Image (cartoon, grey):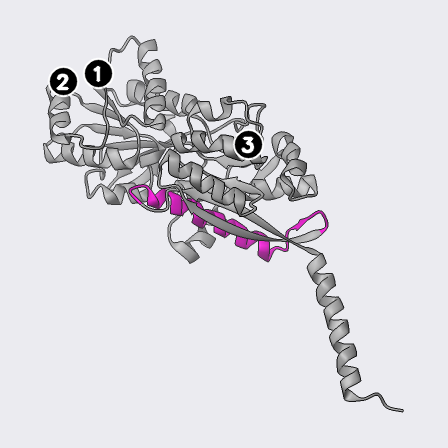
Amino acid sequence: MKQSNAHIERIACAVLALVLFAACSRQVTVKIGVVGPMTGPLAAFGNDMAKGSQVAMDELNSDSFTIGGKTAHFVMLTEDDKASPEEGKAAAQRLIDAGVVAVFGHLNSGVTIAAAPLYAKAGIPQLSVSTNPKYTRMGLKTAFRITADDIQQGGALGKLISEKLHAKSIYMVDDQTTFGVGLSDEVNKIFKLRNLVVPHESIDPKGADFDALTQRIKDKNGDVVFMGGDEGFGSPLLKALRKAGWAGKFVAADAMCDPSSIKNAGGAADSNFYCTVAGVPPSWLAAGIGFTQLYKAKYGAPGAYSTLAYDGIHVLAQAMQEGNSIDPAKYLPALATGSFDGKIQGIVEFDAKGDVKDGTVVIYQSIGGQLIEQREML
């Protein structure tokens, strides 16, 4: 006797349900938080981080990356910390409540340091691009830095100014942020080693009189200005200097070393502008060139933080794979002690503090409005 069509359909549905259940049981969703300034003066940097992270996650998903024998599906949860420590803590708590198993962020050192204890309490690994040394010296087992710190970056900047730029008179300014003050202190250590006495002002960007500051710099005949701080402070200062006819060399660090920073300076940074990035450019490795092509197809030219975020997501994924789990408690030991394939940075390993080993600092010069790597200045 033939089975009815309805009976056959029930069997088919049951088989399909079993197949779908089996497929789902072989998959795991990996939620990673990406947090930084997504709005405001530093939005370009935060969005670069998110875009670089998304390129990495798309790549991992298309490659059917496995963790613990299951195919991993990576999902990015973004939060805007508005470059504010208080907003950063609130953003961190939202990510924790959303069930992320790792965080890439924050950007600003002051925000990263403020939020880090929350991730530590929740046991969630935090991989940051912030460069202030304090971040990895707080004794938090969940804090990791994927880039050189300000001891290394400040040393490179100090040597650039004192040895390569042939400065006759140097003027230092910082924006009173944790990043700006800390970096300026490291640069000044190099100056002191060379017995250079350098005027140094620490200025709150809110209500800053850039015209008056420009005049003080000119009165001191400063031919090299070092700015420790973010683009939101550095760009108005540089514009005021150029408007007043100052033609000296302006030096900044990674928070003003991006094509968007040059564009936002409106011509003021098209020449006699130098900056550093604490990280390897994608042009150094074949995999980095491949990343650039992928990124350009989606978003245009990548920024410095795009590349670091891309590598960071891959490092976190590899640590989970090595630990056979997306459970932070299970893969954290692997992240702390493992050796990972940074697609752009090369081999990525962390020391006992959570700092990346052998962090690289690259110097750039703006030539005709294009940031050009200057290896001979290292």
How far is disc 1 from disc 3 in space, using C-alphas?
Answer: 39 Å
Residue type at mark 2: give it: Lys
Q: Which mark identifies residue 97?
A: none
User: Is residue 149 shown left or right of residue 9?
Assistant: left
| Residue lying furthest top | 195
Residue at image coords 89%, 91%: 1
Please tell me in which quadrant of the rendered image residue 321 appears.
top right
Residue visible at 23% across and 31% down in the picture? 205
Q: The magenta stretch spans which residues?
A: 40-69
Res 145 seen here:
no
Give the residue number, with chain letter if any, for mark 3. Answer: 120
Q: Position of residue 279 (x, y in %)?
A: 44, 34
Using the numbered discs, state the Cα–Cα distance from disc 3 to disc 2 in whole angstroms.
47 Å
Q: Quadrant of the C terminus?
A: top left
Percent coordinates x, y for residue 29 in the rendering: 61, 53
Q: Find residue 67 and report its horizontal and vertical position in percent.
A: 67, 48
Rendered position, 179 above or below 69:
above
The mark total stands at 3
Residue 18 vertical position relative to residue 232 in the rendered view, above or below: below
Mark 2 / mark 1, whichever is N-terminal: 1
Q: Quadrant of residue 313?
A: top right
**Residue identified by numbered label 2:** 220
Residue 363, given in percent of the width and then of the height, sits at: 36, 31
Label 2 crowd (10 A; few <14 / some 14-19 / many >=20): few
Amino acid carrying label 1: it is Pro
Which residue position holds label 1? 199
Determine if the magenta segment contains residue 67.
yes
Dot 2: element? loop
Q: Nearer the viewer, residue 43 or 368?
A: 43
The three-letter amino acid code for the residue at tag 3 is Ala
